[in-house]
Every structure is written in C-alpha cells, then in structure tokens.
Image (tube, helix red, strand yellow):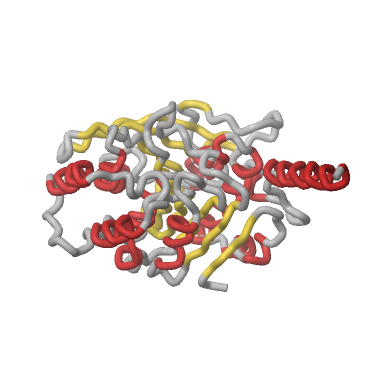
C-alpha cells in the first residue's frame, strides 16, 4: 500500500514539474530573441481621428534609434522621442493588435514584440481599439482601425510616410487581436457557419457561442453603418489590403466565426501561434481549425505545449520564443532575410521540448 502511495505521489510531482517546465531549447539557442542591432529603441505616441466613424484612435510607435557600444546589459527599455536612425530608412512596418481592452491592456501591450522587432529594424505601430462591452463589435471596428491607421501613416502628409516601407506590411496580434489579424489575411466572417457550429456544440470556449441573438444583431447593425448589408447565408466581404504581406495571429479566437468558407479566402503567408491548453480560445477549435482550413498555401502552425491563454503574459521563456519567431517570420517575408528560413521549419522546432510545428511548405 505504501509503495502504491509513493508511486502516486511521484506521479503527481512529475505532472506538476512538467506543468512548470519552461519552453526551452534542447540544443539550439534563440539568437533572434536577443536584442537586435539597434539596441536603443524609441517610442512615440500618436493620435488619429477617423471622421467616417467618429472614432479617435491613439497608440504607440516603436522604431530603431541607434546602436551604442556603451549600452549597459539588461532588458530593452524604449525611450520616448529618441531620434530615428534615418540612415537605414525606410523601415518595414508591422502593425500589432492588442487583446480585448480592459484590465490595463491597451496599445502598449505587445508581449514585448513592439520594442523587440524595432531592435531588428522594424517600425511597429500598435493602435488602441477601445473595445466596448460588446466585444463582438471588434469584428467590425478592429480591422477598420488597422487599415485606417495604415492609410494615415502612408499618407504623404504624415511625417512617417517617407521613413516607412509600405510595400510589404506585417500584421500581428494576440487573443482578440489574433482574431483581428486573421481578418487581415483575406479571411471572412461566415454567420451561417457560426450558427451551424453553435447549434451542434456546447464546448466552444470563450468568445464564440456565448453570443445572443440581440448581441449579434447589434454587430450586424454596426457593420451596416459602414458597409452594404450582406445577403443572408453569404459571407462578409473580407477586410483586405494588397500591401499586407505576412500575418502572425497569436492565440487567435473565434475560429467558428470564419468557418471553412470564410477561411478559404485567406491568401497571405501566415504563422498561427496556438496554445495547447488554451481554456479561452481552445486550440483545436480556433488555432488548429484556422490553420487547417486557410486558403493560403504558405501557412504554418506553431503550438506552445502545456500553455494556457494567459500564460504568455508573464512567462519570460515563452516571450523569448515569440520574439524569435516574430523576427524570423517577418524578417523572412518582409525584410527578405532568406537566412531566417531555417528557423521556420519543423527541424528547428524539434530542438525545443515544448513546441510542435506544422507547415504547408515543408
């Protein structure tokens, strides 16, 4: 009896140990998770007004400033209004979409990707979405926020227009921001797919089938203010822009809102990051479903094993993984750094104890 008890105790202890084991490499390092060539990063705030929606948009810009041989070791801390390192301009652009507004989350919350990508020669823009209580309205306003911000910065009247390369733009986002990023791949909302899914499932997780007819009607009414009504049974026209060249949704939600028909229109290179134990936006119903049904023939799925939805908030090791993959993915697709291709493979992911990788191009 005592022997059995000890076996059970050791079994539980082993399970607990596995739960707290950080994502780490067995042999390979994370070179792109280290601070990049620009070890001084600037940050500026901005404010825009979209008069067509009577909507004020604020946010932040992170950008390369300088490299200093005398910089003290330590974390990268952006400083407000540092001078841009203009010699290498124009810089490639990544626009980041934050999780649902609330609990202190705003445009400054980028999981560290804003300043980190800037250290590798990107300009990163993150916009405050100011989500209302009805989070589903984000399906209407969030992609419009991103596209409006892109157009405003690309305008010749904007001081940044000559300093940013707008020919190839990256989009990233986390949680509800991951959903917004998915909408910029060319994927469309399919109300019919959602209704069919919710009629047959009682295990859809957060932000899917907990939507009432009243709330959904409010979404449709809001959308009708800016776009022609959609014929019943048809998918929404996608929110797209030809300048978007690569998209990285992290822990995206609302997979059934797209359905197979809606995802078929996604046609840009996409790296989806899912979390195996995501209790809010469950891996199989959201990240995996999106990956399997996207129309893009250049897509990949990185799965963070044993990770929950909010685990990345304070997990330094996971943030390093995200930094590594963000630099490699956007560097390859936007900066043209072909040497990063080796980091976007199953062989590289296999070096880690808590990662899996799927891709359509291997």
Residue 174 found in image quarter: top left
Residue 198 position (above or below residue 54): below
> Relative to residue 121, is residue 255 drawn left or right?
left
Query: Can residue 154 be seen here?
Result: no
Residue 232 position (above or below residue 253): below
Q: Residue at x 48, y 65 (%)?
A: 299
Q: Residue at x 38, y 37 (%)?
A: 100
**Residue at the limit of the structure toward the front, as seen here:** 1
Residue 196 found in image quarter: bottom left
**Image x and y of residue 179, in percent:** 38, 50
Quadrant where the C terminus sits is bottom right
**Image x and y of residue 219, in percent:** 21, 45
Closest to the observer: 42 or 180? 180
Q: Residue at x 50, y 32 (%)?
A: 42
> Relative to residue 182, is residue 29 drawn left or right?
right
Closest to the observer: 78 or 187? 187
> Relative to residue 293, is residue 19 drawn left or right?
right
Q: Residue at x 87, y 42 (%)?
A: 2
**Residue at the limit of the structure toward the right, as seen here:** 3
Residue 210 found in image quarter: top left
């Amino acid at each position: 009896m005592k022997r059995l008890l000890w076996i059970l105790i050791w079994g539980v202890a082993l399970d607990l140990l596995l739960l707290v084991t950080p994502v780490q490499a067995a042999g390979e390092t994370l070179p792109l998770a280290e601070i990049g060539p620009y070890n001084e990063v600037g940050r500026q705030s901005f404010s825009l007004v979209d008069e067509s929606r009577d909507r004020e948009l604020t946010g932040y810009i992170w950008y390369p400033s300088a490299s200093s041989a005398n910089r003290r070791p330590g974390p990268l801390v952006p400083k407000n209004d540092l001078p841009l390192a203009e010699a290498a301009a124009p810089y490639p652009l990544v626009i980041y979409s934050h999780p649902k507004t609330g609990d202190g989350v705003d445009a400054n919350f980028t999981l560290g990707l804003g300043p980190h990508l800037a250290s590798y020669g990107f300009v990163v823009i993150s916009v405050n979405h100011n989500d209302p209580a009805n989070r589903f309205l984000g399906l209407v306003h969030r992609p419009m926020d991103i596209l409006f911000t892109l157009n405003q910065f690309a305008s010749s009247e904007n001081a940044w227009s000559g300093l940013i390369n707008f020919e190839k733009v990256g989009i990233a986002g986390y949680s509800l921001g991951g959903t917004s990023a998915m909408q910029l791949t060319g994927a469309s909302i399919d109300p019919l797919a959602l209704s069919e899914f919710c009629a047959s499932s009682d295990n859809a997780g957060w932000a899917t089938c907990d939507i009432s007819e009243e709330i959904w009607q409010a979404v449709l009414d809001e959308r009708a203010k800016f776009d022609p009504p959609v014929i019943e049974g048809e998918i929404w026209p996608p929110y797209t822009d030809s300048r978007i060249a690569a998209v990285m949704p992290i822990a995206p939600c609302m997979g059934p809102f797209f359905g197979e028909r809606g995802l078929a229109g996604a046609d840009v290179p996409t790296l989806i990051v899912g979390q195996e134990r995501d209790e809010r936006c469950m891996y199989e119903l959201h990240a995996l479903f999106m990956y399997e049904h996207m129309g893009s023939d250049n897509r990949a799925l990185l799965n963070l094993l044993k990770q929950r939805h909010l685990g990345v908030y304070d997990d330094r090791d996971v943030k390093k993984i995200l930094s590594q993959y963000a630099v490699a993915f956007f560097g390859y697709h936007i900066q043209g750094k072909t040497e990063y291709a080796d980091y976007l493979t199953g062989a590289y992911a296999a070096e880690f104890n808590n990662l899996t990788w799927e891709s359509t191009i291997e």
